[in-house]
């Protein structure tokens, strides 16, 4: 049985962790299956957005450390293989299509770090988050030390990075770390609802918005400003722009093709 369920639903790619008997603990095989799904999202022109979720009661208990010890000791870090994209992607520039994240139960360590590399987050009430690395003798190396303070503020981030304490979905919602807080069992439905709205929007517009936002975060506002109109120019020549104007004039829903 696959460790990750991958399924296409129209323009949406569903990526589902599928090791519930181990609380979806991520071993190296699961990592590479997720990385292959991210590559599929980026390179399939029919796909416009992904939803990441997990089977069972929990999103993930974290990394299976005994399987990863040698990787962490190599001094190079986690490396995706051919036909894969890193789902942690600390630089944040390899994926140009959005990912919606849906969590439940416990979402620890690598689960938080994958969440931080997604764009819109949904969690069920009662979900618990944690970066447990300092309790295991290491420190977070999947991007949490780079991204978490940006998301929730310096003090909040260090409060949990340095102690390994848990925080709740309700806290995460207050901080803005998650955007939707739903009843248990509804997290995937809400994530799909959001993803389907994104899939109906103009793909070039969505990808341009995401890229410009990532440039602003990683390279600064001036870099994003400098590249904004050069990036917009080919989009303005697309068929989708004509469709957007025509559908507005005809008072109908636009049908975009990503061209």
Image (spheres, rainbow, N blue to C red):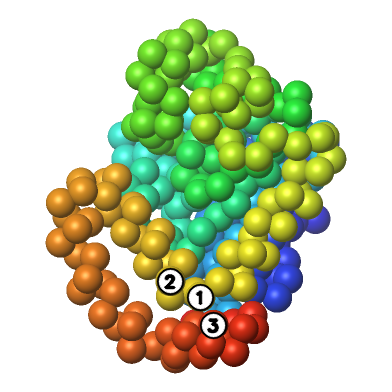
- Residue located at (69% from left, 51% from top): 191
Camera-side residue: 244 or 178?
A: 244
Above or below, 219 against 63 in this view is below
In this orientation, does residue 164 appear?
yes
Instruction: Assess disc 1: are there few (<14), some (14-19) or many (≥20) residues with their C-alpha within 10 Å of its C-alpha.
Output: many
Q: Residue furthest top?
A: 163
Read off the residue under disc 2.
205
Q: Position of residue 18 (x, y in %)?
A: 75, 48
Between the C-alphas of marks 3 and 2, the distance is 16 Å
Q: Sequence-wise, which precedes: disc 3 or disc 1?
A: 1
- Residue located at (64% from left, 64% from top): 197
Compared across the picture, whether 24 is left or right of 164 comes to: right
Q: Sequence-wise, which precedes: disc 3 or disc 2?
A: 2
Instruction: Assess disc 2: are there few (<14), some (14-19) or many (≥20) residues with their C-alpha within 10 Å of its C-alpha.
Output: some
Between the C-alphas of marks 3 and 1, the distance is 13 Å
Mark in the foreground, 3 or 2: 3
- Residue located at (37% from left, 67% from top): 208
Read off the residue under disc 1.
202
Q: Position of residue 161 (x, y in %)?
A: 45, 17
- Report helix, strand or loop for mark 1: loop
Q: Are marks 3 and 2 in contact (CB under 8 Å)?
A: no
Camera-side residue: 121 or 200?
A: 200
Camera-side residue: 26 or 189?
A: 189
Instruction: Assess disc 3: are there few (<14), some (14-19) or many (≥20) residues with their C-alpha within 10 Å of its C-alpha.
Output: few
Q: Are marks 2 and 1 in contact (CB under 8 Å)?
A: yes
Mark in the foreground, 3 or 1: 3
Between the C-alphas of marks 2 and 1, the distance is 5 Å
Point out which mark residue 248 bears: 3
């Amino acid at each position: 049985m696959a460790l990750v369920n991958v399924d296409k639903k129209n323009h949406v790619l569903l990526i589902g962790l599928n090791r519930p008997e181990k609380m979806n603990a991520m071993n190296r095989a699961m990592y590479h299956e997720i990385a292959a799904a991210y590559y599929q999202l980026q390179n399939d022109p029919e796909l416009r957005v992904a939803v990441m979720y997990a089977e069972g009661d929990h999103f993930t208990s974290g990394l299976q450390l005994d399987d990863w010890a040698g990787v962490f000791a190599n001094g190079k870090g986690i490396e995706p293989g051919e036909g894969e994209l890193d789902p942690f992607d600390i630089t944040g520039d390899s994926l140009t299509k959005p990912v919606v994240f849906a969590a439940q139960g416990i979402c620890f360590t690598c689960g938080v770090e994958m969440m931080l590399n997604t764009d819109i987050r949904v969690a069920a009430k009662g979900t618990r988050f944690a970066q447990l690395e300092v309790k295991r003798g290491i420190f977070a190396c999947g991007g949490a030390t780079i991204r978490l303070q940006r998301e929730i503020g310096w003090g909040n981030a260090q409060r949990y990075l340095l102690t390994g304490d848990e925080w709740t979905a309700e806290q995460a919602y207050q901080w803005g770390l998650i955007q939707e807080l739903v009843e248990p069992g509804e997290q995937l439905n809400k994530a799909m609802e959001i993803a389907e709205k994104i899939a109906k929007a103009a793909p070039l517009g969505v990808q341009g918005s995401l890229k410009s936002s990532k440039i602003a975060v990683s390279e600064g506002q001036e870099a994003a400003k400098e590249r904004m109109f050069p990036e917009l120019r080919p989009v303005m020549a697309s068929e989708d722009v004509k469709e957007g104007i025509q559908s507005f004039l005809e008072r109908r829903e636009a049908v975009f093709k990503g061209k």
